[in-house]
Image (spheres, rainbow, N blue to C red):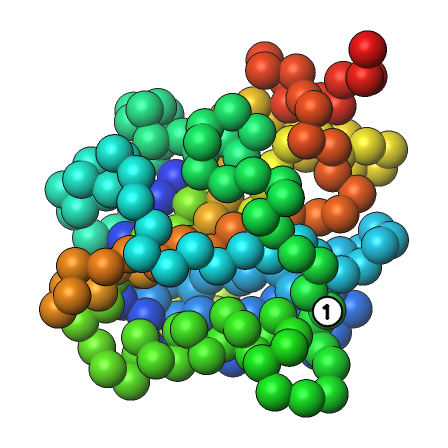
Amino acid sequence: MRHRYCILKGRPRQMALDDDATPHIEIKVAAKGWHRVAVNARSIQPPHELLFARIADFRHPMLRQLMALPNGITDIASKRALALDYTRGGYIRRERMRVVPFRKKGPKNDLRELIGLELAGAIKEGGVSLYVFGESWGPEPTRPDKYFGFTPGQGIHDVHMNQGSRADFRGTNRARQDGALFLHDHRTNRWTALFLAFQSQSWRTDPKTGHPVKHR
């Protein structure tokens, strides 16, 4: 089973929400076979609520390169110009992100609703391509997918900022290896970007290791 930093390009087809100790928003994606995207909705490490930003009409020079990618998995090792870096790449600023709970009473005020409604619209209307940056897993030929039942089980996780972590999660830090979701509506040619990060992560990081650096 290979793990690699990559981009998954495909069409979102179904969604599921899990309520275990590490809840995720699960997305079934058609992309040269089936894939599952697991999006963190709550942090194990306090503070538990994630940082989230939705940028409508997102614009960036890399979008032309994304459109040119084939459906399926693209290994970013061969496309390093597409590697995301929240702290240096000009994609998102910390002050544009807000703390959003995993689940809260009321309409459109928690992460499952904010991301879920975005994806539900894309699934219902069609004509939307989903681009997911993260780390791949699989294929697992003898293990059906846990949520959607397709075989082989395979997909993408770590769809969030992947640097600036401390203590037990320091080993997960990577330079220029952040995750995110981008939706492209082919009818309007408009892009929507969804960025996620943990509150415990530092936004001052070493450009080679992704580890936090001390303020001077």
Tell me the residue at 51%/25% (across/down): 88
Tell me the residue at 82%/17% (across/down): 214
Tell me the residue at 27%/35% (across/down): 62
Tell me the residue at 86%/33% (across/down): 167
Q: Quadrant of residue 185?
A: bottom left
Amino acid marked by disc 1: Pro
Residue 168 vertical placement versus 121 (above, below): above
Q: Is residue 1 visible?
A: no
- Residue 30 appears at what percent x and percent y? 27, 67
Q: Is residue 19 visible?
A: yes
- Residue 73 appears at what percent x and percent y? 30, 46
Left or right: residue 31 versus residue 203 is left
| Quadrant location of the C terminus in the rendered image | top right
Left or right: residue 16 versus residue 36 is right
- Residue 37 appears at what percent x and percent y? 46, 61
Left or right: residue 32 versus residue 144 is left
- Residue 104 appears at what percent x and percent y? 73, 81
Q: Which residue is mark 1?
A: 101
Residue neighbourhood size for the residue with mark 1, other residues' Cα within 10 Å, grouped as few (<14), some (14–19), many (≥20): some
